[in-house]
Each structure stands twice: as structure tokens, then as C-alpha cells.
Image (cartoon, coloured by chain):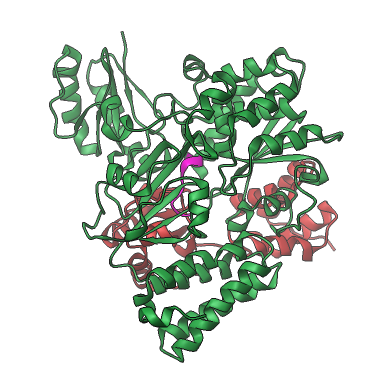
Chain colours: A red, B green
Amino acid sequence: MKIEFSSPLSNVENIIDSLKNKEGSLLPILHAIQKEVGYIAPKAIERIATKLKQTPAEIHGVISFYHQFRTTPPGKYQIKICRAEACQARGSRALEAHAKDFLAIDYHQMTSDKKFSLDSVYCLGNCATGPNIRINDELYGRISNQRFDQILSNVDSDLK
Amino acid sequence: MTTKIFIPRESTAISLGAHQVAQAFTHYLSQHDLDIKVIRNGSRGLFWLEPMVEIETAQGRMAYGPVAPADVASIMEDISQNILHEKPQCHALALGLTENIAYLKKQTRLTFARAGITDPVSLDDYLALDGFKGLQKSIALSTQEIVTAVVDSGLRGRGGAAFPTGIKWQTVRDATADKKYIVCNADEGDSGTFADKLVMECDPFMLIEGMIIAGLAVGADQGYIYLRSEYPIADAILQQAIEVAGVAGYLGNDVCGSGKSFNLEVRLGAEAYICGEETALLESLEGKRGMVRFKPPLPALEGLFGKPTIVNNVLSLAAIPFIMSEGSHAYQQYGTNRSRGTLPFQLAGNVKQGGLIELPFGSSLKDLIDDFSGGTASNRPIKAIQVGGPLGAYLPSHKLDILLDYEAFSKASAVLGHGGIVVFDDSVDMLEQARFSMEFCVVESCGKCTPCRIGSTRGVEVIDRIKNDERRAENMILLNDLCDTMIDGSLCAMGGMTPIPVRSAFTDFPQDFFLTTQENHHD
């Protein structure tokens, strides 16, 4: 039977081939796939396992250990709110509540239009100017509730 | 002559709009006939002033901050009408000469001497300010002479554990193996810390130089920087700097014509706090779950892929170029008791003036807060200060006389760690903070040992019962016992130190646990 690969999966093959000879290649491979595709699908896990001569369970074990890796598609904009102490000292607990209320989702969920997914993160290293959020690869400091709403409403034009 | 304007490309500045400010300057300059060029520099670490813009003058750099895009036109008018005619600055955001800003002037910047002054990926800038001088001197020395210099400097690991760096290097140097590694721990996960990030974003060649010297000292030809993925800007800048250093012959198969090889690669973590623990980090680098290893064997003897490995924090490696270039004594003369040199403290949380404060060990926490913080951002009184990250004690306002050195903190059952200082005002509920410490351990435990994996979950439950007044006195005893179990039975600092902030919360803030002073003194 011929297996039809969608284009993301053929990219996955290329990514694995280009990185698999590095020492300790699994994390670089997972990062590269997630950057390219947005998540690491079960089919990709099988491919990685075969090419690295490991079992799918081992690959899944590594993926599930790290908060960043995901096996389902994320929202177009992945919002991460810093929950760590320095942000708490500047009001992040209130921001977390506001964000969940504003988006009407909890952590590890996605809005029904698939535009936003919401996750927590433990420290973005911007501790003197919290509360902080990250949207995709962009970092935003001093996030009041109003600024949060404003950033989200402008996100389409700001994060092209 | 072209005048330079400096706008940081460092992440805090960017998070507050530095790119937009830079665009506004570039746009203004394209519309006006002025011989001015925009340089993207690092940050001085004065974060309440970011984005801070500086202009070069005959007297030194003059600063403005915090600058928004809307301020750019008026700043440019001040520059063209006053600064370019050697007249004083006249603008609401004018800060005068950067070097004279008190926050900077009161510091002793050895590791951060170049931060914010240079374009972080300009090799010329680095070389002009003593860059690679330590490497050049090291190449002329024997491997033992390099290690001895590090031992003599008194440098101790800046990641938190404070193990003498030179002894670690000696162990790796003396090991016999076909392959050795230098691993830089750049998984700076402690809340309230950002000094590693500032090194990597503002002066990456210094870290690269420190790693090359480590490689020469112990005979390692491969280095890895294990960088947390929460730092994408540091990643981009490091990649650029490694590329530049390679082209210039500082990395590769013939480091500066010495005939020795050293190659360097950045590897990203994936949001796992435990990977800051050195053995979990090595597992992660090997492509595995970041599970903590038993010690012994020490990583210095059996580390990455079972080979002798130096695992050093960014700040430890970043201190090496100064030590090698200026001599062990020059570094060792700073500090107090067994804490030698300087520590880049990081002032964060609820303060008006958060930032990077490099000082010799030995001043008091109170003096640091009084001299630098400018008070709380909320204008409310300070209730607690957590020093040393999420595994550090919460110090109450009457215990701030403590001296900032490793031994003084250890004696007070507190942690100096990586030098992060997080200030809380009186609105903080310390029971909630204790609960958070346990919850953080639930989320971030690698799961290898029971006291950490299960103990933290039980800890959250016990604290919830105390909060809800379910048999409060009995549950306080249980919480205290649980802390003992975690301290005594955990494999690494994650489970073993989580009780530190928890205990400090109920010992020093008993009112938040609804305890009278008497109830708190149980056996």
C-alpha cells in the first residue's frame, strides 16, 4: 500500500534526515518539526522512531516530558503567560484570571476559532518589567489587562 | 564624522517597544539630512529606563529613557539643536551622561563591563574593549597554569550551588579520556533572574571566550550551550556571534593558530525547569527525558555521553576572560570571606527600578534594596523578598540586614543561588506563595524520586486544608513533617529545596497561616 504523505510529513522526513547524525539529535529534531509544522503528530513520531532506531514509546516519552512539545495543533497565536514569582509580585495572578475570562478558555485550551491557544510558562526572564506574556516568538512586558486586550486586538497586523 | 545613536536589541527593551523606537528613528533619519547612524547595542540593564536610547558625544554617551516612538521627533530635535552643537540636553526624558547614572555608577562591573556599550555581534567592538585578551594569554599557558589561575581566583559556580569552579576544572583536566566536553548551563529558570540572558544578548563573545579557554584548559574540543527556549532573542544573538567567531578563527579546528580544536553549538531546552539541574541537563542534551541522575559518578568524570564534562553556569564561564586577562588576584581581591569576586544581582518583582546590579559579595540585602530599588512599584511597604529563585527563602522585612554572601545565606537557611532578588509588597499572601512553591514542584519534578514527585502533590493538599481550616494544627505538623521528608529523601535540589520557601513562609509569616506565635512553635 502506498502511503500518502501530506507535505508537512515529507518536510518531517527531510528534517529528521538533516539532523539525525548530530550527537543527541532528538531534541533538535523535535524543535525543528514543531517549528515547521506547529506540533508533532503521531505519524511524525513513528517516522522519528524508525529513523533513530528507537521505539515510538521512547519518542513519546521525551515529547511528553517537556512542556513545550505538543502533539496537537496549537492556535494561530500561542499565548504564554508567565506564572513565576517575579511576575506574581507585579500582578500576574490577576492577569491570568483576566486572560482566561477574555478568551473564555483555560490553560492548555484553544479558542473555538483556533486563533488563540493559552498556556502558562515558568519565567520568561523579564522579571523587572512583569507581568509578561509571549505570543509566538514575541515577548511583551508590563502587561496590564487593558494592554493585553489591546495586543490581542492588534495581533493580526503586528504579528504577520 | 557620523554620529551613532544606540538602541538596544536586548529582550527587555524589545518587550517594551525598542524595535518600534528603532524604526521611528530610522524613519526620521530617512526624512532628514543628518549624518547619524542607528546601532543596535546591548542593554545596560537599567530596565525601568528601557527602551533607553543613547547618543555618542565628545563627553561620552548621553541617554534618554524610557523612549516611546512618539518621543522620537522631539528627541531628534534636541539632538540636532543641542547635542550636535555641544549644548546640554534639554528634554523631559534626558538622563545626562549614561556613565553618571547613579544606578550604574554605584556598581562594580567586571562581567558586565561591556554590556550595553557594544553591538553584541561586532567582533571589532569586542576586541576594542579587551575582548579575547584572556584567550590570547591562555594560549601561551600550560593547561595546568590555566586551571591554577581559575582555582586561585576563588571563583565559585554562579548557577546556585557555588561549587569551586577551579576544582571542577582540575578534575576534568586530570581525567583520561578520548573525548571531553564543555557544557554551558544556560537554562536560567529561576524566577527573578536574567543575568545569563543579559550576558548572551549583550556580550556573547565573552561567554564564547570563556568556553574556549575551558576547552583549552581541560583538553575538550566540543562545547554545547544548553539554552532555555524561553530566550529566543538570546538564541538568535548567540548563533550570530558563534558564526562570526568561527569565521574569524576563534572556533574550529585551529583556534587562533594554536593547532587546537574547539567547536561550539547552541542546543535548546523545551520548557523544563529541572533541566537546570546539571545531570538532568546532560540527559536532555543526550536526547532523553530530563531525569536527574544519581551522583556519583560526577559529571566531571562521567558526564555527557559518559565522558568527562565541565558543566558551568553562564556567569561562571563569563567570569573567566576577566580572570585570565587581568589575573586571579584582580578578581580575588573583590568579595568577602569565601565568596570572592562579584555577583551580578538581579533586582526584580515589585520595585520601581529593577535591573542588573553587579557588586562584590558582602554588602547587605537592605543596602542593595535601599540604594537601588527606588521603593516598590506599588508604593506599598515591602512584606517579603525571595532571594535565589523559586527554591529560595522568603525573607521578612525585619531580616533584610543579611549579608549577600554564600555562607551568610546558608546559615540563615536561605539561598543566594543565582542572585535573583524578587520583592513583594504587603498585598502578598504567603500561604498562597507556599502553595505555589509546592505546585511548581508538582509541575516541574522529573518524577524520579518519590518525596519530590508525590510529596509536592501532598504538600498542595495539606496547604489547602490549612487554608480551609480543616484540622489546622494537625495539618501544620503534617506540613512540617512533609518538609523534612522532602529535604531528607529527595535526590536533587528540586524536592530537597522546595521546603525552603514553604518553611520560611509559615515560620516568618505565621499570621498568613492563621497561626498565633505559640501555635507555630510546635515540636
Q: Residue furthest top?
A: B1
Identify whether B185 is placed above or below B90.
Answer: below
Query: Which residue corresponds to the image point at 60% horizontal and 72% vertical from the top-left?
Result: B484
Side of B421 where B139 appears, left or right:
right
Q: Position of residue B384 (x, y in %)?
A: 35, 61
Query: Which residue corresponds to the image point at 58% horizontal and 78% vertical from the top-left?
Result: B481
Q: Can residue B115 be seen from the camera position used here?
A: yes
Identify whether B154 is placed above or below A38.
Answer: above
- Give the position of the N terminus of chain B as an image quadrant: top left
Magenta extent: B190-197
Query: Which residue corresponds to the image point at 48% horizontal and 69% vertical from the top-left?
Result: B502
**Numbered circles on residues, count:** 0
Side of B373 where B220 appears, left or right:
right
Side of B427 where B233 appears, left or right:
right
Q: Main secondary structure of the magenta part?
A: loop
Identify whether B82 is placed above or below A3.
Answer: above
Q: Position of residue B380 (x, y in %)?
A: 22, 60
Q: Position of residue A84 (x, y in %)?
A: 45, 60
Q: Position of residue B444 (x, y in %)?
A: 59, 64
> In this view of the protein, which residue sits in the foreground, A3 or B387?
B387
Identify whether B335 is placed above or below B488.
Answer: above
Q: Residue furthest bottom?
A: B471
Q: Is residue B193 magenta?
A: yes
> In this view of the protein, which residue sits in the foreground, B21 or B392?
B392
Determine the image quadrant of residue B325. Answer: top right
Q: Is residue B368 magenta?
A: no
Q: Can residue A11 be seen from the camera position used here?
A: no
> In this view of the protein, which residue sits in the foreground, B168 or B518?
B518
